[in-house]
Amino acid sequence: MLFPTVSFGVFFLCVFIGFWYVFRRSVERRMFLVAASYLFYAFWDWRFCFLLLLSTAASWGFGLLIGREKEYFWRKLFLVLSVVFNLLLLGFFKYYNFFAESANALIGYFAHGSAASATAAAATGAQSGGFIFPALAIIMPVGISFYTFKSMSYVFDVYLCELPAVRSFLDVALYVSFFPQIASGPIVHAVDFIPQIEQATALGAEPGSKPIEAARAFELFMSGLLKKMVFANFLSTLFVDPVLSDPSTYNAIEVALAAVGYSVVIYSDFSGYSDMAIAVALLLGFKTPANFNRPYVSFSVTEFWKRWHITFSSWLRNYLYFSMGGSRFGKARTLVALFFTMVLGGLWHGAALTFVAWGVMQGLALALERGFGYGNTRHPNALVAAIQIALTFAFVTLSWLVFRAPSLDSVLAWFAALGNFSKGITLLSPLVIALLAAGLAMHAIPERARASCRSAWVALPVVARGGAIAAFFALLAVVSMSGVAPFIYFQF
Amino acid sequence: MDKAFGTKREDRSSPNGVLATVAVALIAFSLLCGQSLWIPASRISDLHLRAIALAMTDAASSFAESAGLDGYVPEARDAFLAATGLSDHPDWDGRYFNRRSADSEMATGSPNAPGADAAVGTETATGTGTAGDSSLVTVEERPAAAEGGLAQAIPFAMISPALGPDASAQNGDPQGAQSAGAPAKLPARTATIHSPDNPLKVFFFGDSQVFSLGSGLSRDAGKGSGISVDILAIHSSGFIRSDYYDWPAKLKDTLGQTPYDAAVLMLGMNDHQSFRDSAGTILKKESPEWNEAYKEKCRELIDLALASVPRVYWIGMPVVKNGVYEKGLDYIDKIQSEVALEYSPNLVVRVSLRDAIPGAGKPYADSVSLPGGKSLRVMAGDGAHFTVEGGQLAMKPLFDLLCADYPFSEVPVAKLPE
């Protein structure tokens, strides 16, 4: 069930009425939200609800064990067991075939003389020597990467004493399964969500109270839709996908701009989904930290990761980078920790060498910037700062190219196509150029201007706001594609 | 000011305020977009919910029509599409998408079936072909279609391919019936020798799977070779749900405007769902009535294609990762194969994807091993669509068939991933 569909509209209207009008007690609302979240998840595949329940139960149990234990050894042991459990769960569904294939290739190299024979044997299910991992047709449950990280966040936060162990299973279940965030994030940390539950589920009890940040929610939902249905859908369909699927047939300018276009597309797609998820949560009284903050105005890769997928990067920082020692054990150790944090961050996106290569690029860039003390402050000279931003954007764009590519050979094909100056320009229309420019320019709108617009929006009376929302959707009906395109980050 | 989240307390509304805002927005939107309110309602997968939603949107549409405001948005859309040049783009056009009147059938499932289509393709229509040959093919080549009555609706003169004696020889001969995945050796039936200057024009159309398969075939052929492939991939489309995408109308227009030497058809990934027949009766999937109606849908489209091209290559269903989805596709594959057998193998050639990747009788595999030992990812992350490289491998049998079936000045060599 995707956000911009009638099905979701009907589902959410029922949830909204149930939450605010039917169920008034806090415990009822928690139960209702958990039931609604599981129903939402079951729309993809009801069988995966059991997996979600298992992950939740394990985290809740390990959280209680860690919370009760005072001994460092036992707390650490329970944390490790919890991490291993969650990683096994995630690993089996997401990475099994990748590792089985790699292991088979290695075994085949020694046992069969070639990797191909071992992989072929595995594909046919043949057991050769007992060391071949069979290829399994495992379906990856929607959102497993996101909710597994949320489960781990809860246990980590209890271990790090950021949060007391939660005795209520319902609260942990609500945190892990909360439907606006389950399919594609944001990966809200337990310490940011669980303390809200009591307050959010008790809202609206007083007569005349106004518990919902509705103006902000409507604004975010519309901005998310605009990003997804105009910028992401238009650019990917009209330009980026055709060019990047076969760069050799397009002019060098188109090939280069398609990479820039993909940067706009992935930002619009993912931040658009995040905006909508934050908006839906707000309408139920739950606040979510920002997940994106104009990432393409970053002057360094270090700053980029403070602005891009913020809930994910802060997860990596708080629970992975700090666990590896962070910056406490000298410069060399810090750089190694940074590098491997990003490599694992790349692997989180999927079992493919391109994701690992993307993580290596990010890790190397962060380590280099840290090593040379670069990237913490913007240069005071505007021209130099602009060059810093352009260089960072160029690096990020190249890394997205690796991220998107089905194989590293495709990246090489893209580079080779940069020499195609003799081919005619076929897809670069004025509309595409306008979308590319607007997609990048949206990052340049200063926060002050955004705040002014927001103030004007908030000041609108109900009728005018409703009319403006209708006009916005009518505008979407004028320009939108005839079908529904999927969100990029759903695959993770 | 809320420091953590950057919002002001005065932004807040009551639940009543939210509902009032939504109600105002819905009423205003209904007035502006009355003509097309049924479209989002038609995407609801549950039959009963969809019936309720459609009844409500129809009422709202009538109200909007009486208010006289519902014409502005369609006019603005037409103006926008004309100004941006998107009027003829397959993903924006309004002639084939969302045609409620195109078919009284409304499937009980969503056109955007889970695990199915995701990608969107683009269309290029170029070149000229040799489909204008004048000899006729009688519908008796496909007995079941003749009985079904649909073929009679197509004027004989429209059925152009020149198979002549070869085709006639197959009439009523069970031995002549092809087996899916192992088509009979076809004689060349055109005098045209194809070359890079006069390439074999292939029209590859269907659902989102065509994006990777079509690109794969295109890559197999390579640029400037004797085979030129035009692709039209419409995500979430199928033989059924022509209210979502009207393939018969699109095919008639496209093939009527541009001659092709062959058509390649790949539809069915979204078809394992119940639908209504023209009388409004629900046909439950896998029931005998559903089977027959589905076969008739297939025949309708194939006959339309055969009216303009000499031969249709019909791609079967792939092996997918999701077990439930796989069972559905396997069922569709069998039904489609039965329909293919009704046609002369000179007219319709069934090409098995399952035999190509992962291989006959083998289970689903994300990757395959290349001869050099390198592992190649052939399936996308959703476990249902091919990667473009996977499409290259999967389309190698079709590429070989094209090379064998048509004369070339220099036989093209497939460019496969290494």
Image: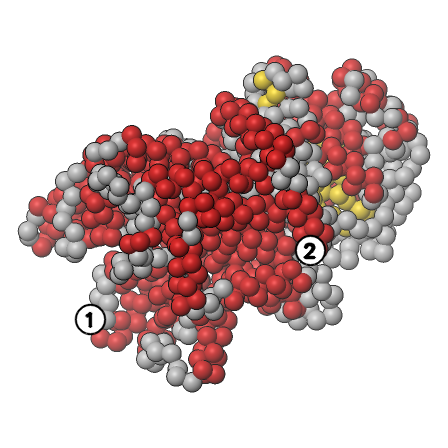
Q: Residue furthest bottom?
A: A381
Question: Same subunit under labels 1 and 2?
Answer: no
Residue B315 vs residue A359: left or right?
right
- Chain of the residue that carries numbered disc 1 in the rendered image: A
Tell me which residue sits at (70%, 22%) in the image: B296
Q: Position of residue A230 (x, y in %)?
A: 56, 53
Q: Secondary structure at mark 1?
A: loop
Tell me which corner region of the image, top left, top right, bottom left or bottom right, holds residue A374: bottom left
The numbered disc on residue B160 is none
Amino acid type, mark 1: Arg
Is residue A55 found left or right of B90 in the rendered image? Answer: left
- Image coordinates for residue A430, horizontal then vertical, percent: 67, 63
The N terminus of chain A lies in quadrant: top left
Check disc 2 and report its element: helix, strand or loop: helix
Residue B84: which numbered mark, if any?
Answer: 2
Q: Is residue B170 left or right of residue B75?
A: right
Q: Residues within 10 Å of mark 1 (few under 14, many from 20)?
A: few
Mark 1 = which residue?
A328
- Looking at this view, is B104 or A129 the one in front? B104
- What is the CA distance from the residue labelled 1 to the residue labelled 2? 57 Å
The residue shown at (85%, 48%) is B128
Which residue is more in the foreground, A420 or B167? Answer: A420
Residue at the image point whose x is 35% and y is 57% from the top = A290
Q: Are marks 1 and 2 in contact (CB under 8 Å)?
A: no
Q: Is residue A413 visible?
A: no
Q: Nearer the viewer, mark 1 or mark 2?
A: 2
Amino acid on which the number 2 mark rests in the picture = Thr
Residue A161 percent across, percent down from the top left: 14, 55
Residue at far left of view: A70
Q: Residue at position x 80%, y 46% from top?
A: B201
- Does A347 appear above or below B367? below
